[in-house]
Image (cartoon, rainbow, N blue to C red):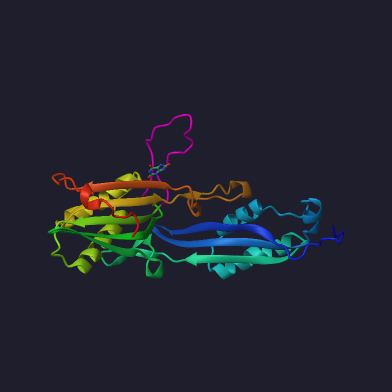
Amino acid sequence: MSTEKIVLGDNQFGKAENHLVRVTKDGDLHTIEDLTVVSQLHGDFASAYYDGNNEHVVPTDTQKNTVFAFAKDGVGSPEEFLLRLGQHYVDDFEWVTGGRWGARQVSWDRIPVAGAGHDHSFYRGGSGGETRTAIVKIDGDAKYVISGLQELSVLKTTQSGFEGFPVDKYTTLPETTDRILATSVTARWLFNTTDVDFNASYDSVKQILLETFTNHYSRALQETQYLMGKAVLEAHPEIDEIKFSMPNLHHFALDLSPYGLENDNEVFWAAHSPYGLIEGTLRRESLGDTDKIWKGVPAFV
Ligand SMILES: O=c1[nH]c(=O)c2[nH]c(=O)[nH]c2[nH]1
């Protein structure tokens, strides 16, 4: 066995995937900044690795908290935000000589309602937008068309609450009348004819889904889902049934009071898992059994 000393080379540590959503409010006009941040420190940490001595180990938990606390003062640009974060560590911890801070920022577009961008409801457009799907089934003489979309990401920064749920000994969730509601809509809708301008129909259904997400105070994602499906079926007689799968993508307003800061629903942690999963089928009451048509239709195409 070699007795050569094993030495520590490059090292760094911190917290990855700090998913921050910063809401800035100018009256009813809200803007959002959505960044996923990684923080990694360089410095004199040898005794932590060699001796288990944590005197210099700025906890990764603290690095996470610092990301959210710093967001209280706004983000501005990811570059400025990261420069501010990094400067804090080299200024305030003498053994920290540097580090690496990174961010992925995604942009949200305002949902267009009657030609104007909405004040507080957003969707992911451009390359972050939804995928359109289509499925055709033929069974003898019968032809069925199922159109759909997946991963239409929408988020509203207010006009959403959740109250009145049953409470048992496992319930810790507080009631709320003001929260972020965010989901990524997967929907499939079944036509009762093939005589359809499918491109125009798709554009209209998507717009109805977006507008309906926007246009009411949501008492739960379940209610919002029902209203979205109802609006589609009411506006489109050529569609008989719509199925949804919608994650409830939780955004937790963080308690910044331990750092002497208030959080009036401005700084949120966007948790990735677990997420709520809200699914439902909306259909015309008189519609017969369609199970055979849906059989074999995958959840995601
Ligand atoms: O809109 C919601 N529906 C739920 O079923 C639920 N459950 C939960 O914990 N939060 C929420 N929000």
The secondary structure making up most of the magenta span is loop
Q: Dividing the image into 4 quarters, which one contains the N terminus?
A: bottom right
User: Which residue is at a point 16% across and 44% down the rendered structure image?
Assistant: 285
- Dividing the image into four quarters, tell me where ligand 1 lies: top left
Residue 100 picture location, percent across and down? 65, 66
- 195 displayed left or right of 27: left
Residue 47 picture location, percent across and down? 81, 56
Q: Quadrant of residue 289?
A: top left
Q: Quadrant of residue 2?
A: bottom right
Regarding residue 74, the answer to whether it shows in the image is no
Residue 43 picture location, percent across and down? 75, 63
Outermost residue toward the right?
A: 3
User: Which residue is at a point 33% across and 56% down the rendered structure image?
Assistant: 186
Residue 103 picture location, percent across and down? 56, 65
User: Which residue is at a point 39% across and 56% down the rendered structure image?
Assistant: 155
- 220 displayed left or right of 9: left
Q: How many marks?
A: 0
Regarding residue 204, the answer to whether it shows in the image is yes
* Span of residues in magenta: 159-181
User: Which residue is at a point 55% across and 68% down the rendered structure image?
Assistant: 78
Q: Dividing the image into 4 quarters, which one contains the C terminus?
A: bottom left
Residue 113 counted in the magenta span:
no
Residue toward you, 131 or 218:
131
Residue toward you, 263 or 139:
139
